[in-house]
Image: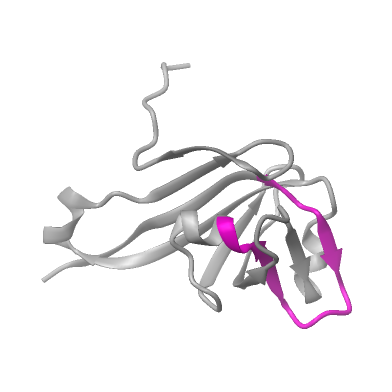
Amino acid sequence: MVNRVCLKGKLHRVTTTHAELNYEGSCAIDENLLEAAGISEYEQIDIYNVTNGERFTTYAILGERGSGVISVNGAAARKAAPGDLLIIASYGVFAEAELSNLRPCLVYVDAGNRIVAERTSIPVQAPF
């Protein structure tokens, strides 16, 4: 049996609201966004900073519901600044047989980190 690590949930192009160096490491995320993306508190997440190219791993903690907060904390605060655009992704381990039914929770937001769209697949883009 083959298992694969695949995308489970994604917050696409959220805006960093805070970078708190002197805080216990993690990333505080608006609880509405966590729920929409299927990310649990304390779950490992990967963060891809669209603004500066940094990529790092941390874990999610609950941010105030409806606040739009995306606070990168601890040492990771050196990798993101307020205003930076981030992609936050979570992954799961899936058996080969599960892959045909895999539907990740893809969440798209506006500049205030309010949900504007939710999808279960990435739209096909025209070739370059």
From this view, report whether residue 32 is shown above or below residue 106. Answer: below
Q: Position of residue 79 (x, y in %)?
A: 78, 60
**Range of magenta residues:** 14-32
Q: Position of residue 39 (x, y in %)?
A: 48, 65
| Residue in the image at 56% along x and 62% along y | 46
Q: Position of residue 44 (x, y in %)?
A: 52, 73
Nearer to us in this view, 4 or 32: 32
Residue 54 among those drawn in magenta: no
From this view, report whether residue 91 is shown above or below residue 44. Answer: above
Q: Position of residue 105 (x, y in %)?
A: 40, 50
Q: Quadrant of residue 57?
A: bottom right
Residue 16 among those drawn in magenta: yes
> Which color mode does the image show?
one colour
Considering every residue shown, the one lying at the far bottom of the view is: 24
| Residue in the image at 39% along x and 29% along y | 123
From this view, report whether residue 39 is shown above or below residue 36. Answer: below
